[in-house]
């Protein structure tokens, strides 16, 4: 186990160095980068499809799409009219997360579309992606209420460093024994500054909140860029 | 990346050697061991609670419970009257899977209850646990229909080596756009020998099928033991 931890430290150090390079690259290009993480099937791709609709004609969006196998999600994003760069990790040992180096490669392919916001859809996994800085400006962790109200408590690393937490599929909450108040409290306990979004893809209003949040964050972040 | 792959190979080789030791240990003790893997919130713990009810007074069951943080699931299992050994991986770098060495340690704590079946509830993760042989007799992969009908295709490593695949929460399928025929076909494409169980925890009949399947598998496996 000691050996494993030492090896991991190497991997994290390499990744952090590459993340720093990404951050400088993104800053120079004036692009705001969001790392969207969450369980398999929590609704990440559907959320991006909806953001694409909201941003159409207003903000130049691009997507880096992470999947172990298949280009299914990338096809959905392309159909929504958004430039997309696909990363299939079955070519690198079925990796359970995206790394900074992979992100830079993917970015090169969509760079010429001059995106103002890039959303990275990370691999569907509530654990490993949390450990890998991709050089992003904002971390968003997403979990569906269908997974049960104990998930925030049981998977803390995914929530302690996220600026925003999305609880999805809120429209079918009545079919589940789900204590929403408890979950909100658990998120705030782990991460007092996290913004919480309770969304349903059937409720356009709830989506608009998140969509506006990203635009506001982008504006604030760019201001800070100019000051430094 | 080359370095990373080489390091991983070391980890897998170590784990496989330890898995072999587990296998011999389990065989000697005459215990049938099931590695239950699946997404966060797909219903693994609830399934085990229900198996506990079915086996009460008939089969000596024990559980090895994997979680990153908290003893919530272990408490649920204990409440169901089943001996349980908890493995919290936040003590080993938030590990995203269980390893053979961890299993042996956990087994030592429940060994004296002379279990006939042990269920290992792996960490809620549709990716990493698939890579780690724990010395089990049977692999079961579980995914909830609430995650969408593309999950089998998108996460193949979890399904290619599982003797059984469970599709859970089948009772609320009408609230989702879910093509069940397609999913069954995808499972069979990846793994022609997999047994498929479509279960709802509200339908005791569907649970009994799986419960009987484990008992049958145990009997067959023990027969093979005697022959070799």
Image: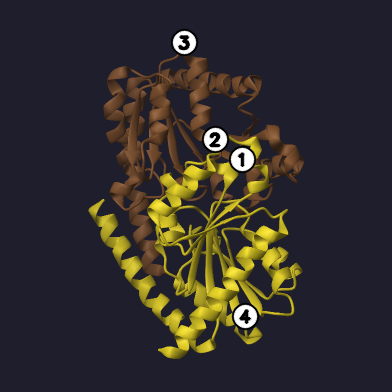
Chain colours: A yellow, B brown
User: Closer to the N terminus: mark 2 or mark 1?
Assistant: 2
Residue hosting label 3:
B58
The residues bearing labels 4 and 1 have C-alpha atoms spaced at a distance of: 34 Å
The crowding category of the residue bearing disc 1, from other C-alpha atoms within 10 Å (few below 14, some 14 to 19, many at least 20), is many
Residue at x 32%, y 22% (from the top left corner): B28
The crowding category of the residue bearing disc 3, from other C-alpha atoms within 10 Å (few below 14, some 14 to 19, many at least 20), is few
Q: Chain of mark 4?
A: A
Q: Residue furthest top?
A: B57
- Residue B144 got which mark? 1
The residues bearing labels 2 and 1 have C-alpha atoms spaced at a distance of: 8 Å
Instruction: Look at discs 1 and 3 and give the one toward the viewer.
Output: 1
- Residue B43 got which mark? 2
Residue hosting label 4:
A110
Tell me residue B52's x, y (percent): 47, 20
Callout 1: helix, strand or loop? strand
Q: Give the side of residue B120 with respect to residue A8, left or right.
A: right
The residues bearing labels 4 and 3 have C-alpha atoms spaced at a distance of: 61 Å
Callout 3: helix, strand or loop? loop
Callout 2: helix, strand or loop? loop
Q: Chain of mark 2?
A: B
The residues bearing labels 2 and 3 have C-alpha atoms spaced at a distance of: 23 Å
């Amino acid at each position: 186990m000691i050996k494993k931890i030492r090896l991991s430290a190497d991997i994290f150090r390499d990744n952090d160095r590459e993340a720093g390079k990404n951050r400088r690259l993104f800053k120079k290009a004036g692009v705001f980068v969001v790392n969207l993480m969450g369980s398999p099937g929590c609704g990440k791709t559907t959320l991006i499809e909806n953001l694409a609709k909201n941003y159409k004609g207003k903000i130049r969006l691009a997507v880096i799409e992470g999947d172990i196998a298949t280009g299914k999600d990338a096809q959905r994003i392309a159909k929504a009219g958004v430039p997309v760069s696909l990363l299939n990790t079955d070519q690198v040992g079925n990796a359970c997360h995206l790394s900074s180096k992979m992100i830079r490669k993917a970015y090169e392919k969509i760079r010429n579309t001059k995106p103002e916001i890039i959303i990275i859809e990370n691999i569907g996994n509530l654990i490993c992606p949390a450990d890998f800085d991709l050089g992003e400006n904002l971390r968003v962790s997403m979990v569906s209420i269908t997974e049960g109200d104990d998930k925030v408590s049981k998977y803390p690393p995914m929530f302690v460093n996220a600026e925003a937490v999305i609880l999805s599929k809120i429209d079918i909450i009545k079919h589940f024994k789900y204590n929403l108040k408890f979950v909100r409290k658990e998120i705030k306990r782990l991460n007092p500054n996290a913004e919480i979004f309770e969304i349903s893809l059937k409720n356009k209003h709830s989506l608009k909140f998140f969509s506006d949040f990203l635009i506001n964050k982008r504006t604030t972040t760019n201001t800070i860029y100019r000051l430094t």
